[in-house]
Image (cartoon, rainbow, N blue to C red):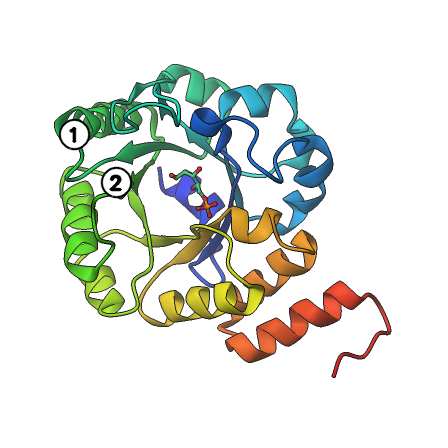
Amino acid sequence: MQSRLARIFRPESGRTVMLAIDHGYFQGPTAGLERVDLSIVPLLPYADALMTTRGMLRSTIPPAARVPIVLRASGGPSVLRELSNEQLAVSMEDAARVNASAAAVQVFIGGEFETQSVRNMTRLVDAGQRYGIPVLAVTAVGKDLTRDARYLRLATRICAELGAHFVKTYYCEKGFDTVASACPVPLVMAGGKKVPERAALTMAYNAIENGAAGADMGRNIFQSDDPQAMIRAVRAVVHESMKPGEAYALFREESAGPGHVVD
Ligand code: R5P
């Protein structure tokens, strides 16, 4: 278990930059993920871990990339239906077979199928304990719920109390430090919908400064004008605590190419 966690969280910083590309499990070919072989594979050297599905892993992710895998292990409803009605979608045996570093499950606190999703998580944790595979609980905020510190404290703490080895949650402007400090396991910030690069880097910086142990970003990286420059800038924020202004300048420099000086 510790060995797998150390693949995801870099020992030098104790933090992680996870690249989330699992969106297809409920919403099909998301913008930027139509051709994972072309858009994502070149980014793998910059990701500490890749959050993906077993289908994408089997079909498209080159084994030689050697990127630690956080395997999406829940699913069921599509974006056309009630999303909280998920079931476990991967056995821990298969997660072990594909050499996953962790298994990820959605938990819908306050959602219609709250108990079912919590049960999915606790079953996955029980299986993970047998195999030494950590479980990432992803706090999924339903559309009628507010992503404030009060809600996020509730959701993250329930996941940790019931056995998740690390938790992914959204950032909130006010009181994120109380979310992180009340969660006894590492907290990874979720990216969320695409915003301008400077805003995404600022959000990541604030999350890290307030106690997050990393960022798991999808759209803010692969929908960026320059995904490679963006993931490199996110790495600087997460692993070097680079300030957002400097990280944005780095993004622009990387984006402009070698030898190009950006004002
Ligand atoms: C969470 O609901 C799923 O794991 C998403 O597919 C993914 O994490 C979203 O990443 P982002 O919000 O950064 O695009």
At x 48%, y 73%, the residue is 241
Q: Residues within 10 Å of mark 1 (few under 14, many from 20)?
A: some
Q: Is residue 103 above or below residue 49?
A: above
Q: Quadrant of residue 84?
A: top left
Query: Where on the picture, by quarter, is residue 88?
Result: top left
Name the secondary structure under disc 1.
Answer: loop
- Residue 17: which numbered mark, if any? none
Q: Amino acid at mark 1?
A: Glu
Q: What residue is shown at x 74% (from left), y 64% (from top)?
A: 255
Q: Is residue 1 left or right of residue 101?
A: left
| Image x and y of residue 33, in percent | 61, 35
Residue behind mark 1: 112
* Residue lying furthest bottom: 263
**Residue type indicated by callout 2:** Gly
Residue on which the image places disc 2: 142
- The image position of residue 193, as x and y in percent, is 46, 50
Return the x and y of residue 38 as percentages of the image width and height.
73, 36
Q: Quadrant of the N terminus?
A: top left
Tell me which numbered mark, 2 or 1, is placed earlier along the sequence. 1
Secondary structure type for disc 2: loop
Residue at the (17%, 53%) spot, across then down: 151
Work out whether residue 164 or residue 225 is closer to the camera in this orientation and state it: 225
Q: Position of residue 235 (x, y in %)?
A: 56, 61
